[in-house]
Image: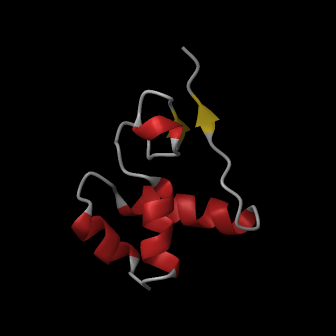
Amino acid sequence: MTCDPDVLGGKPVFRNTRIPVLQILRHYYVEKWSVEEIVSEYPSLDPQTVRRVIEEYEKNGGVLRVRFVVR
C-alpha cells in the first residue's frame, strides 16, 4: 500500500494501482465479498496481496499502516 498526494488525493491505494485500499476492505468486511470475488472484479490485484492487506489490517486492530510517497 502507498499514499501519494498525486494519486486519489493521497488516499491509501494498492501499490502501482489507483485502487483504494478502503474500497477493497469495504467489499470484504461490509459486503462480505470473498478474496476470489475481489480479484475477479479487480484483476490487477492478486489474491496474495489482498490477503496480506487484510491480515495486516486485522493484525493492526483495524488500523491501516501505509508507506507514504514523498516527492
Q: Residue furthest right?
A: 61
The percent coordinates of residue 63 (x first, y second) are 71, 59
Q: How is the structure coloured here?
A: secondary structure
Q: Nearer the viewer, residue 41 or 49?
A: 41
For the image, the number of numbered tags is 0
Residue closer to the observer: 31 or 58: 31
Residue 1 x, y percent position in the rendering: 52, 44
Q: Is residue 41 left or right of residue 17?
A: left
Q: Image quarter for residue 52?
A: bottom right
- Residue that protrudes farthest toward the front in the picture: 9
Q: Quadrant of the C terminus?
A: top right
**Residue at image coords 54%, 36%:** 3
Q: Is residue 63 above or below residue 1?
A: below
Residue at screen point 37% across, 50% down: 19
Give the left or right position of residue 55, taking residue 63 as reference.
Answer: left
- Left or right of 3 in this view: 40: left
Image point (32%, 75%), residue name:
36
Q: Give the percent coordinates (x, y) of residue 30.
A: 49, 82
Depth check, front residue: 34 or 23: 23
Using residue 29 as the reference point, say whether residue 40 is left or right of it. Answer: left
Q: Is residue 9 above or below residue 19?
A: above
Return the residue found at the far bottom. 32
Q: Is residue 35 above or below residue 10?
A: below
Q: Residue at x 51, y 60 (%)?
A: 22
